[in-house]
Image (cartoon, rainbow, N blue to C red):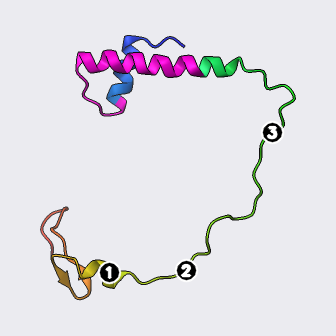
Amino acid sequence: MKLSDSDLLKLADLSKLNLTPKELSKFHEQLTSVFEMFEKLKNVNTEGVEFLSFPERNRMREDKEVSSTGNFLKNAKKVKNGYLKVKSVLGKAT
């Protein structure tokens, strides 16, 4: 896949990246390299290779309810009625 300059600029914009021309050039080289690796993978012969699947059992630990309020409240700058008090971000509190 050939990556055009306009594709690169659009990708940077969508990623909210403010890149300098030097950074854009480096980014272009790096992405081109990644796309070239994917092209090589497309050509790998996978004939006769069995599909790899994982068992459906849960390998994660069992969920356990744990109270952690004491841990973070003791380090908080401000606590009010057992809650962490922070500055209002939506406007004046009522």
Residue drawn at 18 percent across, 71 percent down: 86
Quarter of the figure with residue 58 = bottom right
Residue 28 relative to residue 75: left or right: right
Magenta range: 14-37
Tell me if residue 77 comes above or below residue 14 in the rendering: below
Q: Please say whether residue 65 is one of the residues in the magenta stretch.
A: no
Give the amino acid type for the residue marked by disc 1 in the picture: Asn
**Residue 64 got which mark?**
2
**Which residue carries the number 1 mark?**
71
Residue drawn at 12 percent across, 68 percent down: 92
**Which residue carries the number 3 mark?**
51
Q: Residue furthest bottom?
A: 81
| Number of residues whose C-alpha sits closer than 10 Å to that of mark 2, classed few (under 14), some (14–19) or many (20 or more) | few
Residue drawn at 53 percent across, 20 percent down: 35
Measured as percent of width and height from the top left, residue 19 is found at 25, 24
Q: Under tag 2, what secondary structure?
A: loop
User: Between 7 and 29, which is closer to the camera in this rendering?
Assistant: 29
In primary-sequence order, the first of circles 1 and 2 is 2
Measured as percent of width and height from the top left, residue 24 is found at 31, 18
User: Between 80 and 45, which is closer to the camera in this rendering?
Assistant: 45
**Residue 49 got which mark?**
none
Q: Under tag 3, what secondary structure?
A: loop
